[in-house]
Amino acid sequence: MEKRILGRSISKTARLMGNNLSQKFHEAGLDITKEQWYLLNVLEEQNGMNQQDIAGLCEKDKTSVARQLDVMERKDLIVRTTDKLDKRIKRVQLTNKARELRVVCKKIASKTLDELTYGITAEDIDITIDVLEKISARLHKK
């Protein structure tokens, strides 16, 4: 019998959930990845951030975020504008197309999460989130 390991369970579940969501987007005919979906949500909350701030908030390296943003720019989901005070800084903003896509994706993501958590009590979900947030907070202190 395989030993239960927290890190492995977290990693496996996150990967499977992300793959499942990507599949649902694909089945709906949407040209968006789970990574781009995450960035859409980050930018919806804080539109106009620069790439470095986005990478920090997402806890991803600047290069991978820049690649995703390049793809999103080609898909007309974002525009990069020059900062008014510092011409070296590019601000990233969502387009109307991205906002419309986000509405559709949000419905799919919500339905998918409902399907995945069916039969799991709200209390169990809250406990799981509490535990993961405690672990995350400890990791951020290091």
Image (cartoon, rainbow, N blue to C red):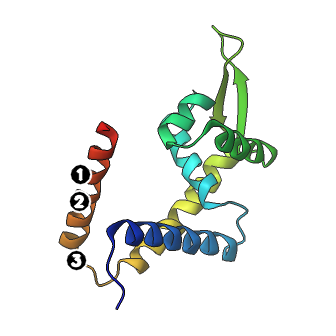
Q: Position of residue 116 (x, y in %)?
A: 41, 78
Q: Which residue is mark 3?
A: 121
Find numbered disc 3 in the image and state the secondary structure of the residue it sits on: loop
Graded by Cα atoms within 10 Å as few (under 14), some (14 to 19) or many (20 or more), the crowding at tag 3 reads few
| On screen, residue 124 above or below 78 | below
Q: Which of the two discs, 2 and 3, labels the residue nearer the N terminus?
A: 3
- What is the three-letter code of the residue carrying label 2? Val
Q: Position of residue 39 (x, y in %)?
A: 58, 47
Q: Nearer the viewer, residue 37 or 29?
A: 37
Find numbered disc 2 in the image and state the secondary structure of the residue it sits on: helix
Q: Spatial distance from mark 2 to mark 1, Cα to Cα?
A: 5 Å
Q: Which residue is mark 1?
A: 134
| On screen, residue 138 above or below 12 | above
* Horizontal arrangement in the rendering, residue 130 relative to residue 19 (left or right): left
Q: Which residue is mark 2?
A: 131
| Residue found 64% across the figure and 69% down from its top | 25
Find numbered disc 1 in the image and state the secondary structure of the residue it sits on: helix
What is the count of numbered marks? 3
Q: Nearer the viewer, residue 120 or 28?
A: 120
| Residue closest to the far bottom | 1
